[in-house]
Image (spheres, rainbow, N blue to C red):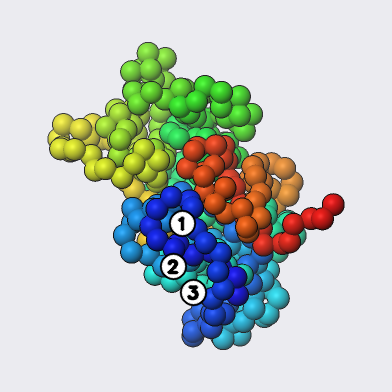
Amino acid sequence: MKAIVISTHGGPEVLTITELPDPVPADGDVLIRVKAFGLNHADAYMRSGAWGQVAAVPGIECAGLVEADPSGNLPAGTRVVAILGGMGRTRNGSYAELVTVPATNVVAVRSRLPWTDLAAVPEVYATAYSALHGNLALKPEETLLVRGATSSLGQAAVNLAVQHGAQVIATTRNPAQVPLLKEIGATDVLVDDGHLSPEAARRGMAVDALLDVVGNTVLRDSLATVRPRGRVCQVGFLGGFAPVTDFDPVADLPSGVQLSFFGSAFVLGSPAFPLTDIPLDDIFAAVEAGTLRARPTRVFHFGEIVEAHRLMEAGQAFGKMVVTLEPPSTD
């Protein structure tokens, strides 16, 4: 099979297309013929070496067809999406024509959306749904602030929260992205300079829940931005992985404010966080109906992976980017 491998840790140019033996599914695995896969910042972290030793083939999600399922539960040809399950970390990932994934991390889908549209949904929507409903227990009519909202995960959270009936405040570092965030349903947009809490207080904003995609660099400020007894859930590290220096719960965690973390890579597909808890079919149906704007902002072909990673690292995705394994059109 053709696969994209990390030839050595480094920039986008280290991604190389090569030939590898076809993987063979072990008991408990499903072999998938990949039709498209989503791009995630996690892929860039693995490629750069930020997460230490990882699998040679990156990629943490895909859409495709079942090639073989030793358990017999999924017939060959079943349309599926797959998320995580060690892909890209402890086993070769989805940047390939074929991939094996634990059956617990594979979901059959009824949707007839194009492969590229299917591949744009699984990781970001499963993560956003889990954080909004599991960690934050978001209720309709509550006010949610999504910090880092122009990212693909941030946009997924805005979409789901608006669909749920919440009032959404979104943030971006780039004022040019304000219209985009209002278009997808944010009632207000703040330009984030790292100090949101004074602006929220000045405007009299009562933030019930805050989903933080930016991470450690703004954690103290996020905690100070929510109302008394508000909730903060951290789901990303767009601002970098450096730890919060001298974090002191007594000084930095306001009384009554709840702080949690959702790390999809470590738990989704486990018995405690089964994928059956994520209404993926409903989400795909909403995408088909146009009530969720989850289609990819840009589609690349397999051979364009280096350019795709360059755009992702430059912050020019402005949403979800995917790679298709379908041959380029000759039109």
Q: Residues within 10 Å of mark 2 (few under 14, many from 20)?
A: many
- Kindly state the secondary structure of the residue where label 2 is placed: loop
Q: Quadrant of the N terminus?
A: bottom right
Q: Earlier in the sequence, mark 1 or mark 3?
A: 1
Q: Residues within 10 Å of mark 1 (few under 14, many from 20)?
A: some
Please state which amino acid type lies under the numbered disc 2: Ala
In this view, 21 is above or below 230: below
Q: Nearer the viewer, residue 210 or 150?
A: 150
**Residue at the right extreme, as displayed:** 331
Residue 101: x, y in percent?
A: 51, 72
In this view, 36 is above or below 153: below
Q: Earlier in the sequence, mark 2 or mark 1?
A: 1
- Kindly state the secondary structure of the residue where label 3 is placed: strand
Q: Which mark is residue 14?
A: 1
In this view, 196 is above or below 41: above
Residue at (27, 32) in percent of width and height: 220
Q: Nearer the viewer, residue 51 or 63?
A: 51
Q: Nearer the viewer, residue 316 or 87?
A: 316
Residue 217 makes an appearance in the image: yes
Marks 3,2: beta carbons within 8 A: no
Residue 47: quarter of image: bottom left
**Residue at the top extreme, as displayed:** 202
Please state which amino acid type lies under the numbered disc 1: Val
Give the labeled residue for mark 2.
Answer: 56
Residue at (56, 86) in percent of width and height: 70
Residue 324: quarter of image: bottom right
Please state which amino acid type lies under the numbered disc 3: Pro
Give the labeled residue for mark 3.
Answer: 102
Residue 243: x, y in percent?
A: 24, 43
